Image (cartoon, rainbow, N blue to C red):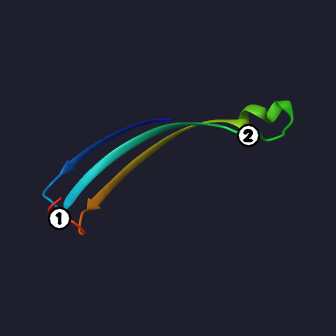
Amino acid sequence: MLRSELGYRFDKTAAIFIKATLRWDRMEIDTPSVLDDYFNKHSLLLPVFGVRLHLQNPDG
C-alpha cells in the first residue's frame, strides 16, 4: 500500500487535507480461472479530501 497526504493547518484547531492511497488487494477466493484476476487481484486508487478539527487539545 502506498499513501501520500498533503495538508494545510489554518490555526491550532482547523486544518484541511487531501490524501491518495494506492492499494493492492490479493485474496484467496476459489473461482473459475477466467474470473481469477477479477476476484483475487484488485488495484484501488482511493482519493480523500477532508477537514480536521482539533477540539480536544488545541494547544498540542
On screen, residue 33 above or below 7: above
The picture quadrant where one finds residue 31 is top right
Give residue 34's position: percent from left, percent from top: 82, 31
Residue drawn at (32%, 46%) of the image? 18
Disc 2 residue type?
Answer: Phe
Give residue 50's position: percent from left, percent from top: 33, 55
Residue drawn at (18%, 62%) of the image? 13
Residue at the extreme right of the image, as rendered: 32
Q: Is 27 on the left or on the right of 54, as rendered?
A: right
To which residue does mark 2 refer? 39
Residue drawn at (28%, 59%) of the image? 52
To which residue does mark 1 refer? 58
Q: Is 50 on the left or on the right of 2, as rendered?
A: left
Q: Secondary structure at mark 1?
A: loop
Give residue 14's position: percent from left, percent from top: 20, 60
Tell which of 8 and 47 is nearer to you: 8
Q: Is 55 on the left or on the right of 22, as rendered?
A: left
